[in-house]
């Protein structure tokens, strides 16, 4: 069936891609977010330093798995003492699970004994969407030049049972241990697991 | 240690107690029950099992009844979540592999999960061993979510006697299990759709499906592995052979070699075998990187436009351009006007053609670059235009004062020369640009897939490239130096230039003949005759004759257009000899037999294609080469609109002809040859 010629001039406008992604090997998306103390934190502030971004939701059972067992705090401690900046990011929207006011966030840091450098509050979800953060926890490791070195889940076992942590392969520590001594990161990405980010 | 429970059970219990303790202290509710059923706030888990087992294998089930609004996950949970985990211990029997019914897509904002709502029953095959009793213990962990997520744990135990007569089932439970079994994916042979191929594209995998039955309903595909492609619903398009779905690759993941899908149509599901993901075609001579950024493509467009000036396709307008250059007034400003007029004509026409192409594609029709020449009516129009131009150059008639001089007849007003240059530019693009040259092919192919503003930028870039040499020559002050002073030689040149235009008329008549058959040719020739006659009539001063001439000319034009339109497009006859018409099924079948295939995408209106045919493809050397290598020769004729050929071109990221593709015999990735063929390029492609 031959189509008829339609002499209509219309310009197609493709919808702009709202979701971006942090891809290993590519530059990390810039961000500009207030932390729990009210200071604005930018990606450019961390140029020259190793940076870990950890998406956090205090009520998510998978975040609890790592905080309750002390696994996350241990990682934070280990790498912050080596000069790595560790930022916990809360992208929960107001009213959703995990949303915290600045004072509550500082309180949570105290009660969980988190050793993160700062807690970033991203209630609009802009930073989470720029990075393509899907779950809590979702981890990103960024090198001093601003390139993403690891993006994905914290380890390879998505069970909510903390008993599996000792036998799980931790991708974040593997990436940091290799990258800090200049070696190539073997696993640059892995499936992130957890509760979905409460945008 | 109580001897009844094996060691493993103790370990399991210890884990659960530890978990219970840890999670209870952190305030999250969890269940750690053991028994035939587990009850929680949102889920009830129970067995679907007979009262007694028989001696042979049976399938039992684990049933999850969910509170409305809550869901659990499939084996690939999607963007977040976790699949339920099952660990089985059996005493007195062997437990087979748990089966997963097909899931549904559960969307949350821009994220997608794959899972189950309301109720799901997982069938579990059991093979009782000779004995009197069977005991099965299932340690479960699952994540149940609504907006928030709650991981839950539990152990299901089942203890039943083994009856020598056979299993004793509760009728309703057996019915539920049978229904659950129907939702488990079967093998791919019985599926109504078949996954024909999967191709790697930029950032995505394109899966092509063909129907195996007369079904028209598009199936739903779920990726089995959660770490390769996105779980969201893929953009789906109907093609001439079936359906194609484009699954975005998860960011940062390496391109996969194989994929598996569960296909759901109606209430049934099938699991595909491993689908090999083929890499994108390798272009031998394209210098552009695989992942094209817009700047690269724009650069390619500019260079492509420049090179187009050297391609055989522009022969029809070469004479016109030469004439325009030479005939322009000697003053630099007039020359610049000419250059500007030409450039404007080129840019406007490129832009207009590009805009119309995008609009036509938006309606869903499969048009490509060169679409204007696929219409016999337009070709007829061009025949008339070139014929009149040739007659004008030969001095057969003069245009009236009110009309613009098409072929740049010496005019005193600058305005006229500007408009004549504009028209030359327009013709240059309309007639001479439908074929692609090096770089242009990729640029146009990219333009077909990019959003409209980027695509228009590419078309205009091509126009800039095409017009640049002419503009440079017109604006350059030293160019005037080589043109000798005006004299009688200009008249001779003018007459001489009519003959290339007449050659164009002959070529266009051939194209028309290919498109509409011998009758179309006859109609066009008669039209030309009538027009020439009315031109002769118009020479007389008597107004009646002049009027009659106009009426005759217009009537003939109208009549001919209607006739041409009405002529059914005769299917392009495959050229005699070894070339067969392009056919996807035949191509796949031949490749499966490990035979090499050479595909020539061509059109009658593409002069570059014809030159390649005469200079390379139809030569004895090439034919001998093809015969020696046992290459199947296929020709995709795009002279008239053909959706299948447009789609075939799109698979290589192209939208225009010529395109030459060689499929090696060993099944490796297809190779694209350069648009201007040489025998050595052909040899390199075929023999390596």
Image: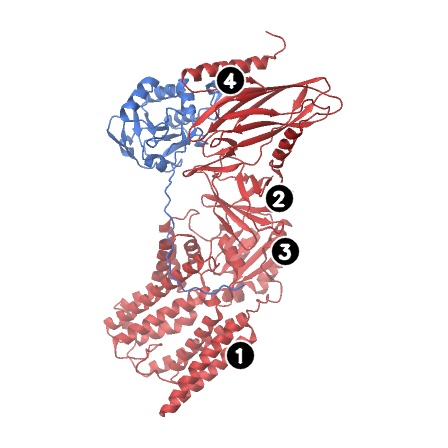
Chain colours: A blue, B red
**Tag 1, which chain?**
B
Viewer-side label of 1, 2: 2
Seen at 50% across and 81% down, the residue is: B526
**Crowdedness near tag 1: few (<14), some (14–19) or many (≥20) residues, C-alpha within 10 Å:** some
**Residue B93 seen in the figure:** yes
Disc 2 is placed on an element classified as loop
Q: Give the camera-side residue of A29 and B209.
A: B209
Q: Is residue B424 above or below residue B438?
A: below
Is label 2 on the same chain as label 4? yes
- According to the image, label 1 marks what residue? B522
Marking on residue B630: 3
The quadrant holding residue B465 is bottom left
**Residue B298 seen in the figure:** no
Disc 4 is placed on an element classified as strand
> Mark 4 or mark 2, which is nearer the start of the sequence?
4
B416 on left or right of B230: left
Q: Give the camera-side residue of B130 and B223.
A: B130
> Mark 4 or mark 3, which is nearer the start of the sequence?
4
Total numbered labels: 4
Viewer-side label of 2, 3: 2
């Amino acid at each position: 069936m031959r189509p008829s010629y339609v002499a209509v001039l219309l310009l197609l406008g493709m919808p702009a891609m709202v979701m971006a992604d942090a891809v290993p090997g590519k530059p990390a998306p810039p961000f500009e977010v207030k932390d729990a103390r009210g200071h604005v934190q930018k990606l450019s502030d961390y140029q020259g330093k190793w940076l870990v971004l950890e998406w956090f939701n205090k009520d998510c059972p998978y975040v609890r798995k790592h905080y309750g067992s002390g696994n996350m705090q241990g990682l934070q401690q280990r790498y912050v003492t080596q000069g790595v900046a560790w930022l916990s990011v809360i992208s929960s929207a107001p009213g959703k699970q995990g949303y915290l006011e600045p004072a509550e966030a500082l309180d949570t840091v105290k009660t969980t004994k988190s050793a993160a450098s700062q807690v970033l509050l991203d209630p609009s979800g802009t930073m989470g969407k720029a990075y393509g953060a899907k779950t809590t926890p979702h981890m990103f490791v960024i090198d001093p030049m601003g390139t993403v070195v690891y993006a994905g889940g914290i380890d390879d076992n998505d069970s909510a049972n903390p008993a599996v942590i000792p036998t799980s392969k931790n991708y974040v520590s593997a990436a940091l241990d290799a990258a800090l001594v200049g070696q190539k990161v073997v696993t640059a990405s892995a499936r992130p697991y957890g509760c979905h980010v409460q945008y | 240690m109580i001897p009844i429970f094996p060691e493993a059970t103790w370990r399991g219990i210890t884990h659960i107690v530890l978990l219970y303790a840890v999670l209870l202290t952190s305030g999250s509710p969890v269940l750690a029950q053991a028994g035939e059923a587990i009850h929680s706030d949102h889920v009830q888990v129970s067995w679907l099992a007979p009262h007694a087992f028989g001696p042979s294998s049976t399938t039992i089930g684990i049933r999850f009844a969910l509170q409305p609004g809550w869901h659990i996950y499939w084996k690939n949970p999607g963007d977040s979540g976790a699949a339920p985990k099952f660990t089985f211990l059996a005493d007195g029997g062997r437990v087979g592999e748990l089966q997963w019914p097909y899931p549904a897509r559960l969307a949350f904002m821009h994220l997608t999960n794959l899972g189950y709502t309301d109720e799901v029953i997982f069938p579990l095959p059991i093979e009782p061993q000779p004995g009197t009793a069977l005991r099965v213990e299932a340690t479960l962990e699952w994540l149940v979510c609504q907006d928030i997520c709650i991981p839950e744990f539990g152990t299901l135990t089942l203890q039943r006697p083994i009856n020598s007569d056979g299993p004793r089932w509760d009728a309703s439970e057996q019915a539920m299990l049978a229904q659950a079994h129907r939702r488990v994916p079967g093998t791919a042979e019985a599926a109504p759709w078949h996954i024909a191929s999967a191709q790697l594209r930029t950032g995505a995998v394109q899966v092509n499906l063909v129907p195996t039955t007369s079904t028209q309903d598009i199936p739903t595909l779920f990726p089995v592995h959660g770490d390769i492609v996105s779980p969201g619903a893929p953009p789906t398009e109907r093609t001439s052979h079936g359906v194609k779905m484009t699954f975005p690759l998860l960011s940062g993941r390496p391109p996969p070699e194989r994929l598996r899908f569960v296909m759901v149509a109606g209430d049934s599901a099938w699991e595909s075998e491993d689908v090999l993901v083929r890499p994108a075609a390798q272009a031998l001579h394209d210098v552009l990187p695989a992942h094209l950024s817009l700047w690269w493509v724009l650069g390619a467009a500019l260079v492509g436009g420049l090179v187009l000036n050297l391609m055989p396709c522009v022969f029809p307008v070469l004479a016109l351009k030469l004439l325009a250059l030479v005939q322009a007034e000697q003053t630099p400003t007039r020359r610049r006007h000419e250059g500007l007029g030409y450039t404007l004509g080129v840019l406007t026409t490129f832009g207009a053609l590009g805009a119309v192409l995008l609009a036509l594609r938006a309606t869903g029709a499969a048009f490509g670059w060169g679409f204007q020449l696929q219409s016999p009516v337009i070709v007829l129009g061009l025949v008339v235009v070139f014929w009149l131009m040739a007659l004008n150059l030969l001095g057969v008639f003069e245009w009236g004062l009110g009309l613009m001089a098409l072929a740049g007849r010496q005019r005193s007003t600058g305005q006229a020369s500007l408009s004549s240059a504009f028209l030359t530019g327009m013709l240059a693009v309309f007639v001479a640009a439908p074929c692609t040259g090096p770089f242009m092919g990729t640029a146009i192919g990219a333009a077909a897939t990019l959003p409209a503003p980027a695509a228009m930028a590419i078309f205009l870039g091509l126009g800039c490239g095409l017009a640049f040499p002419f503009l440079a020559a017109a604006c350059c002050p030293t160019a005037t130096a080589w043109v000798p002073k005006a004299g009688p030689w200009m008249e001779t040149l003018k007459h001489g230039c009519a003959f290339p235009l007449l050659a164009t008329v002959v070529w266009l008549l051939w194209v028309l003949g290919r498109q509409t058959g011998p009758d179309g040719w006859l109609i066009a020739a008669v039209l030309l005759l009538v027009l020439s006659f009315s031109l002769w009539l118009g020479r007389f001063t008597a107004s009646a004759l002049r009027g009659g001439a106009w009426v005759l000319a217009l009537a003939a034009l109208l009549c001919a257009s209607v006739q041409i339109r009405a002529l059914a497009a005769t299917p392009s006859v495959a050229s005699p000899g070894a070339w067969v018409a392009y056919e996807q099924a035949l191509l796949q079948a031949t490749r499966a037999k490990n035979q090499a295939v050479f595909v020539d995408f061509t059109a009658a209106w593409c002069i570059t294609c014809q030159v390649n045919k005469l200079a390379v493809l139809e030569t004895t050397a090439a034919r001998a080469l093809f015969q020696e290598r046992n290459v199947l020769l296929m020709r995709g004729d795009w002279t008239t609109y053909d959706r299948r050929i447009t789609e075939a071109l799109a698979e290589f990221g192209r939208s225009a002809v010529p395109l030459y593709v060689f499929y090696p015999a060993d099944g490796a990735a297809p190779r694209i040859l350069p648009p201007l063929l040489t025998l050595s390029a052909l040899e390199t492609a075929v023999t390596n």
